[in-house]
Image (cartoon, grey):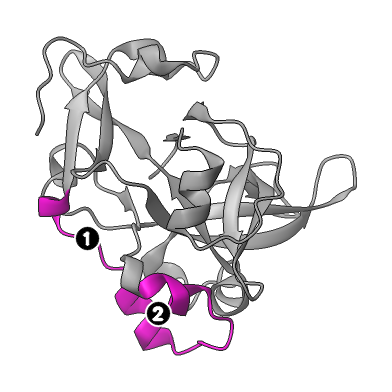
Amino acid sequence: MCGRYGLISGEKEISKRFEIKEFKAEYRKNYNIAPTQKMPIVVRQSPNSIKLEYWGFTLGWSNKILINAQAEKLAVSRVWKKAFLESRCIVPADYFFEWKKTTEGKKPYLIRLKNQKLMGFAGLILSYIDDKGKDRQGFVIITTKPNSLMKKIHNRMPVILRIEDEDEWLNPDNSEIELLEKMLLPISSDEMQCYEINTLVNSPKNNSEKILQPHEKLKLI
């Protein structure tokens, strides 16, 4: 799964990376993004634009907050299929966190691209009614099977879109399921790196560059 990530690039960097002409959202960089927080997503509105939406949504019959959608189920799930075909988005991220189970407990890792450039997670936008009866929209991050690097840490990873696929992913006219599913395959582990960090990241209240520091010496996997 993907249960925490970070976005610390500035508005100019995000705008350039995702071809945003006007960045109208009130954005603050966030080192430790947790579910239910409102964060920027990229949507197709000719040209691309930025919206602020809540991470996660709830089903009408459940109070459980869903934050991820499995790529393998998108085309067949009653929950995801409509959004998969009609309401796709990209979630900008500089890195994400994952916890590895060990005999000593869960150890947090920071995962990013080797070139340390902005990533775009594949996402979906869904409408729902919150616990106060108000109409809301939320986004979820799509996850897929891990590549060889991520297998050492966890059995899922977020879908990191290849730059050449991003326009097609956002294009609402593109509803060819086979083509869309190809975009959801994991990127090569050769493009990624990760290292263990300290447990400050375990609490979303800790939101500073301190949580990005390596646990001991910088050990890239």
* Type of amino acid at the residue the image marks with label 2: Leu
Q: Where is 97 relative to 126, above or below?
A: above
Magenta stretch in the rendered image: 165-191
Residue at 40% over, 17% down: 209
Q: Where is 16 relative to 154, above or below?
A: below
Most extreme residue toward the right is: 133
Q: Where is 88 relative to 100, above or below?
A: below
Q: Which mark is residue 23?
A: none
Q: Which mark is residue 187?
A: 1
Left or right, 179 with respect to 127, comes to left
**Residue 216 vs residue 151, the one in the foreground:** 216
**Residue 36 vs residue 171, the one in the foreground:** 171
* Type of amino acid at the residue the image marks with label 1: Ile
Q: Which mark is residue 180?
A: 2
Residue 214 position by quadrant: top left
Residue 184 magenta-drawn?
yes
Residue at 57% over, 60% down: 20
Residue 191 x/y as whole percent:
16, 52
Residue 171 x/y as whole percent:
54, 80
Element marked by disc 2? helix
| Residue 58 seen in render | no
